[in-house]
Image (cartoon, helix red, strand yellow):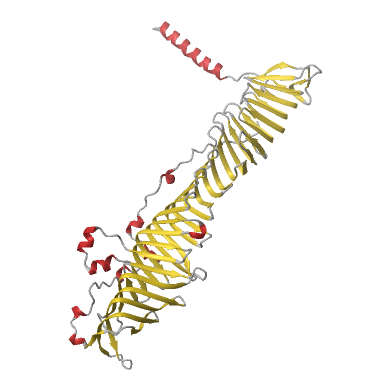
Amino acid sequence: MKSSFCIISILITQFFLGILSAQEPKIIQIRQAGGSTQDQERFPDANILFKSDEKRVILYHDGALIESDQAYFYKKKNYFKAMGDVIFTQGDSLRMTCKTIEYEGKTKTAYAEGNVYLERPDMTLRTEVLNLDRINEKVFYNTPGIIVDSTSTLTSNQGQYFMNQKKYRFISDVTINNPDYIVNSQRLDYFTESNKAYLYGNSKIKGDAYTILCERGFYDMEREKGIFKQNATLFYDNKIIKGDSLYFESEINYAAATKNISIVDTINNSIITGHYGEIFKEKDSAIITRRAMAINIIDQDSLFIHSDTLVATGPEQKRILRAYYDVRILKSDIRGRSDSLYLDESIGLTKLLKKPLTKKQEQVFTVQDYTKNNPVLWFDKSQMTGDEIHLLSNTKTRKLDSLKIDGRVFIIEKDTLSKDGYQQIKGGLLRGAFKESKLDNIVITKNNEMVYYLYNDEDLRLIGIDKTTCSALKMKFLGGQIDDITFLVSPNGNVFPENELPENERTLKGFIWRIAQRPETIEDLFDENDKEEQFSEILKFQYPEEEDSVIRKP
């Protein structure tokens, strides 16, 4: 037992001695010198090496050769300082020239000064002061530096190079000059093999046809595409695009924005907002979904349009906006609902369209079903529905000019003096005109029907309820409500005393008062579906883990 114990003890001792031996730093070697001397008073323990006509000073340490005119070598410290046309080489992977260099053998770190020029197969670096950490394969500089690789020139006030990762970290006033774009950033991590960059802090990328601003970003510099976050803005195709996250790809002329997005059309003076949008430059189009809303300026007033999906198409001067599914519009004096909408700013036309019917629906729909399905507009106190509603504005003044409603026209206005009375007019076609942005008059033709409450002008007592048919009539508006009705063709009807007209005959066939659908505020444009947060994968993009490095002098 005693013998076995001794053997084990010896083996353990040899094992740990082997570890200590392996961990012991290698000693710097003098390979060549023209001569040497000592000056114990000024440089205690230093061996002063100098060149001759035939030989320069050459030192070696663990695969690195350092050539210079003079060197102060401290063997006990395993350290030297070399100067005069210094050349530092590490195999064929790294070559560095400078005026002076200090090297610590224990930590394998170097501190170079004066016209530092570092070369690797994939890049060159120029700066005034450079730290080299050979163990961790890192290079640091705290003075303005210029790096040139196969495609770009990069400058920064501070920088780090991780040789094993082939990664740069540029800090403070970073600039990348490429023939196709310029990048400016507070901090930038750049991977040379993949040609990809990660941006931190206020950053700007300016290409031939685009400009990107952000505070966090990822950019593939070879393909000119990337993901950008935190105050991200893209200036592209006369549009200003913002979002919590932006994706851009120059080669295919495509951009996408996610969450809290806005697209400002500087040519057409319009804004589209939402939670997801895509822009296709080649097709002159943009698609916005999820809480989508367009804001257009009409008569110096904002027209808000919300729908499930908004599509803007066409060149700048002929932009067309299409809205699909559950369209809601809001203006200071107009409200509206429809299934879809078409807006052509070049001719000042806005169409509100109904939901297309199936063949079965066409067979079974009642008049009331049609009224419920048709688009609706509210002008102040008047509700107007029809198969198709057109608003036309003057393209120069951008003021509302005229109104058209084709098919199943139905106008309803709450009678303010009776409890349950409604002014009602039906017809086939409606043509209206605006004056000073207010609906001034309308003409209704084809199979008109009317229910109208008549009052004495003096005491506002109800005279009776007028129930009439007529092929054409004209209505004047005042203060946002019907003020006067003129029959253009002889009418056919009667004025009934209130007690002689049953309540079920006081509404026209198809009557629906849709006031509950009328949006009153911007929030009313949205519903529960707009609160769902389902976003694209670009929101889930993760940045590489942070890697801190201390820049120091050995």
Find residue 147 and report its image quarter: top right
Give me the residue at 66% from left, 23% from top: 89
Vertical comparison of 268 with 124: above or below: below
For residue 494, say whether it is visible. Answer: yes
In the picture provided, is 253 more to the left or to the right than 514? right
Find residue 462 and report its image quarter: bottom left
Give me the residue at 74% from left, 20% from top: 57
* Residue 364 image point, x, y percent: 20, 63
Q: Residue furthest top?
A: 3
For residue 81, say whether it is visible. Answer: no
In the picture provided, is 93 more to the left or to the right than 427? right
Which residue is nearer to you in this view: 75 or 13? 75
Which residue is nearer to you in this view: 104 or 245? 245
Which residue is nearer to you in this view: 517 or 4? 517
Give me the residue at 31% from left, 67% from top: 387
Q: Residue furthest right?
A: 53
Find residue 31 and report its image quarter: top right
Vertical comparison of 279 with 417: above or below: above
* Residue 246 image point, x, y percent: 48, 48
* Residue 423 image point, x, y percent: 29, 80
* Residue 393 image point, x, y percent: 46, 70
In the picture provided, is 295 more to the left or to the right than 118? left
Q: Quadrant of the N terminus?
A: top left
